[in-house]
Amino acid sequence: MEFQLLFTAFQAQPVHARWPQQRQLHECLRQGIRAGTLASGTRLPASRTLAAELGVARNSVLYAYEQLASEGFIAASRRGSVVAPLAGRLAAAEPRPDAPAPRASLSRRAQNMPVLPGSETSAAFAPGVPALGEFPVLRWRRTLDKAWASLKPSELNYADPAGEPALREAIAGHLRVARGALVDAAQVFITDGTQGSLDLVSRAFADAGDKVWMENPGYQGAVAAFRAAQLKAVGIVVDGEGMAPSAADWLRQRPRLIYTTPSHQYPVGSVMSLARRLALIDGARQAGALVIEDDYDSEFRHDGPPLACMQGLAPDAPVVYLGTFSKTFFPGLRIGFMVVPTALAPALALLLDRAAPRGRTAEQRALAEFIVSGQFALHLRRMRRLYRQRRDALVAALAQQLGDVASVHGGTAGMHLALRLHDGAADDVALSARLMAQHGIMAPALSLHAVGLRAQPWRGFLLGYAQVPVEAMEPLVKKLAGVVRG
């Protein structure tokens, strides 16, 4: 074997040029063994002989041989150092240029996940995106710096799986005042956002094959979470008062979980009436089911004060309340929370203690300070005024440009509204793709939010307005109208 040629070719590669000599030799021999150039049973030269042949220090050869031996690539024998038998199998396992690529695919469960709209969240009308330019970054940075400065070395370890106690207390206090919740800090659990909360609820409180009721049309992120947990999603029709289960639904489709967005239905925006909320709580209690109340953007009520949450309507309400700071702060914060019934809190705490070590103590502590200091409430008031102005501008532009072919739904609250086309056969998926391709407008098709095989889909678009300036509404809606009418 001509080792000089092998080593020179290896050194000539730019990526290896600055490596120490001993590392170069070790990697060169290792690569030769893995590729089969140095076959199993090949005897390597004595250390002095190889050092003289390559013009390197003998210590470099000794280092390379020791490393290869410790890794199992060479073995000592009466003939000296030889390439180990294992090397033959390593060479056979090396990929060949002409070899077919291995078949790689997701599980059937993963392939069954719903297709969600694109992720161009910076595009005009992208739903769920707050006015990021209006967030008080400097004030938040100061609060975060203060939180980091307060941490002791011991607090850099894994944190309480339920979340930072100060943040749980702050959230409980805020919910009691702002949402009419009946909550104690022990019922509050910090998560990585609503999607994380949905994953946890569906796995902690239901078994594979259980039925979960969903609004139709409904939030496809919830569909994904429930399918991942192998639950069966059952679509329940939505009307002007929210989710409307029939007596037959309660009889034939008995649920384990009931997912609803009562304060601002996603995606069509209807607000569930008080009578409907109480009936749903009563029905869930009789069925032994849990209601999952997703209160994702209820802080932004434009026509009147925010409505009290379902969780606070009865002391023993079988409701798991979900909240997030992605809409009120910024999505990159990745902090959400859930409030569980008192009877379920100890069992969930035990489950998390076994399986979900937490961290991010500084961010959670800073968020707690932001809430307790009143800065959170101040920011919410500013955003309510801003979003109301932007909502009004969008509604006016839609009425002027598309009032004869579409109707607006769900503009009383939140950060988005639904534009429903009068033509029930319109291809809103194709129109949505055209809007993005031609104008960079992200208007997800409403028909993609249908839940259930027999669901009658809405045709139209989901339009987020929180991040769109007032002066930009009319020009953007003109482009939208041009595509719809075209």
Image (spheres, rainbow, N blue to C red):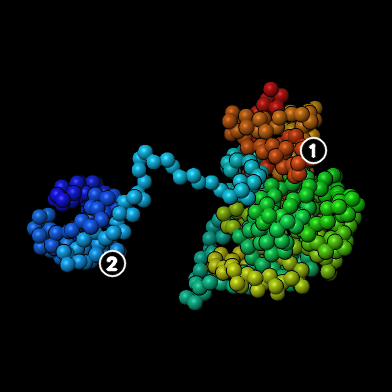
Which disc, if any, is residue 430? none
Give the residue pinned by disc 2.
70
- Please tell me which of labels 1 and 2 falls first in the chain: 2
Which disc, if any, is residue 456? 1
Q: Whole-percent x and y of residue 467?
A: 63, 44
Residue at image point 70% right, 39% down: 448
Residue 380 location, quadrant:
bottom right
Residue at image point 24% right, 53% down: 39
- Three-letter amino acid code of the residue under disc 1: Gln
Camera sees residue 482: yes
Compare residues 53 and 196 and report the one nearer the observer.
53
Q: In 3D space, how far apart are the residues under numbered discs 1 and 2 (Cα atoms)? A: 66 Å
Quarter of the image with the C terminus in it:
top right
Describe the element under mark 1 as helix, strand or loop: loop
Describe the element under mark 2 as helix, strand or loop: helix
Residue 332, compared with residue 409, is above or below; it is below
Residue 418 location, quadrant:
top right
Q: Whole-percent x and y of residue 45?
A: 14, 59
